[in-house]
Amino acid sequence: MDNFTHEMSEKLVQYLDGTLPVSEKEMLEQQLKEDNNLQEELKSLQVTRDAVRLFGLKQKVAGIHTQMMKEKQPKVNQLYTSRKIIRYAMAIAASILLLFAGYTVYNLITITPEKIFAANFQSYELVTNRDGNDSESFILKSYREKKYAAITDAVYDDSFSAEEFFIRGLAFTEQNNIDSAITSLKKVLEVNKTASKSAYNDEAEYYLALLYVKNKEYSEALELLTKISESSDHLYHERVSGKLIRDVKKLKKR
């Protein structure tokens, strides 16, 4: 994951500098349109680069000013002028440090479990049923009609399929019943493991990871997110960005 993050960061820097090859630029711009986390990463790099450039510019100005003062001021004032320039340079450096510190603190404060969940959660859409609704189970039919309460109020049946447990978990999620949603999605993984199957495993892992974040179970969330990001064939691989994982790690460190 670290290699992927480093490579993507390098591409974003090249993109900002205008040195990214045209073919990669078009691909990156498409990714930016589809990935809000990647957009935030680009904004962060832009702010950092602008701050560094500002600091460099002010250093040059300070250097030129110092040279001019040396040439124009009497020698008796050189010591006073040098001290004044040093204080000026230190003030600039302090301002830059405050800028970085302020940005870091702001970024940390604004990261919340709820915001991460909202930014990455999308309501699941069932594939169109070509056989007609009559062949669907009560749970699937109710979910398609957005009757989430009907699903969550139904009597629990241990014979549910992995698909039904998955949809039940999403119904709980839509009603913000996080604990019950987590229980149902974990059941998907258990059922598949017992039956040596993988139906809805990828979907369950991704939504379960987001629910863990919202429920502040960061270790469990990071375990799943890392697994997804390192599995290129995972259905939700592209949705788990380096920034998402870093943000969850920041939440865990609080």
Image: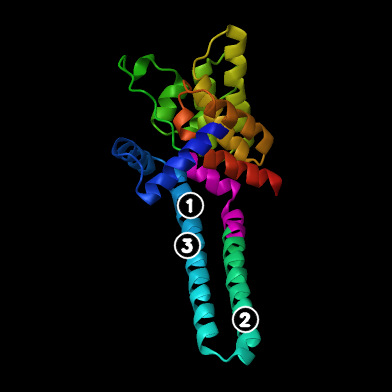
Among numbered discs 2 and 1, the one appearing first in the sequence: 1
Task: Pick whichever, 131 or 224, lies toward us.
Answer: 224
Q: Is residue 172 above or below residue 234?
A: below
Task: Pick whichever, 98 or 230, lies toward us.
Answer: 98
Magenta span:
104-121
- Distance (Cα) linking label 3 and label 2: 24 Å
Residue 189 drawn at (x, y percent):
59, 19
Residue 167 drawn at (x, y percent):
49, 26
Locate residue 28 relative to residue 81 in the image: left or right: left
CA neighbours of label 3 inside 10 A, class few (<14), some (14 to 19), many (20+): few
Residue 82, disc: 2
Q: Residue at x 58, y 23 (%)?
A: 155
Kindly indicate whether the residue at mark 1 contacts the one at mark 3 (C-beta within 8 angstroms): no
Report the magenta stretch's main SS. helix
Where does label 3 land, which residue?
53
- Distance (Cα) linking label 3 and label 1: 12 Å
Residue 68 drawn at (x, y percent):
49, 82
Q: Secondary structure at mark 3?
A: helix
